[in-house]
Image (cartoon, grey):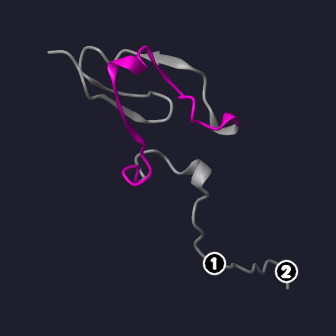
C-alpha cells in the first residue's frame, strides 16, 4: 500500500525520578532535620554521618542569626536548639 501509515498510540509512562522537577516532587516526606547545640558549631553540610557516595561539596552554613538554616544542596534543615538569647 503506497502512502499508508500505521499510527500507534503509546501508553503513558511515568517520568524517571531524575527528570522530575523540584516543583513536581513532594519533598516533605524525605527531608532530614537536625537539632544542634552550640558545641556543634561551626556548622557544615554534609555532616559526618552522610555516606561518602551521596555527599555533595562541603558548605559551611551560618545558623547563628536565625537559629535555623537549610542546606542549598540537599535541603537538610538544621535548627540551633540551645541558642543564647
Quarter holding residue 52: top right
Front: mark 2 or 1: 1
Look at mark 1 in the image and give the residue it sits on.
9
In terms of secondary structure, where does tag 1 sit? loop
Where residue 70 sits in the image (x, y, percent)? Answer: 37, 29
In terms of secondary structure, where does tag 2 sit? loop
**Residue at image point 59% right, 36% down:** 50
Q: Say which mark, if any, is on residue 25.
A: none
Look at mark 2 in the image and give the residue it sits on.
2
Answer left or right for 67 relative to 19: left
Does residue 10 show up magenta in the picture?
Answer: no
**Residue at image point 78% right, 81% down:** 4
Looking at the image, residue 79 lies above or below residue 27:
above
Among the two numbered marks 2 and 1 on one chain, the one whose residue lies closer to the N terminus: 2
Give, as a single range, the part of the protein colored magenta: 26-52
Where residue 2 sits in the image (x, y, percent)? Answer: 85, 80
Q: Local crowd at mark 1 within 10 Å, few (<14), some, or many (≥20)?
A: few
**Residue at image point 23% right, 20% down:** 83
Answer left or right for 42 relative to 79: right
Quarter holding residue 5: bottom right
> Which is more toward the observer, 14 or 67?
67
Q: Please, which residue is most extreme toward the right here? A: 1
Q: Please, which residue is most extreme toward the left here? A: 85
**Residue at image point 54% right, 28% down:** 46
Where residue 79 sits in the image (x, y, percent)? Answer: 31, 30
Where residue 1 sits in the image (x, y, percent)? Answer: 85, 86
> Which is more toward the observer, 23 or 82?
82
Quarter holding residue 22: top left
Amino acid at each position: 500500500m503506497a502512502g499508508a501509515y500505521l499510527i500507534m498510540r503509546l501508553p503513558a509512562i511515568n517520568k524517571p525520578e531524575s527528570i522530575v522537577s523540584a516543583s513536581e516532587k513532594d519533598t516533605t516526606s524525605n527531608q532530614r532535620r537536625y537539632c544542634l547545640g552550640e558545641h556543634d558549631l561551626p556548622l557544615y553540610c554534609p555532616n559526618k554521618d552522610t555516606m561518602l557516595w551521596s555527599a555533595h561539596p562541603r558548605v559551611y552554613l551560618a545558623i547563628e542569626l536565625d537559629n535555623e538554616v537549610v542546606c542549598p544542596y540537599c535541603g537538610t534543615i538544621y535548627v540551633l536548639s540551645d541558642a543564647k538569647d
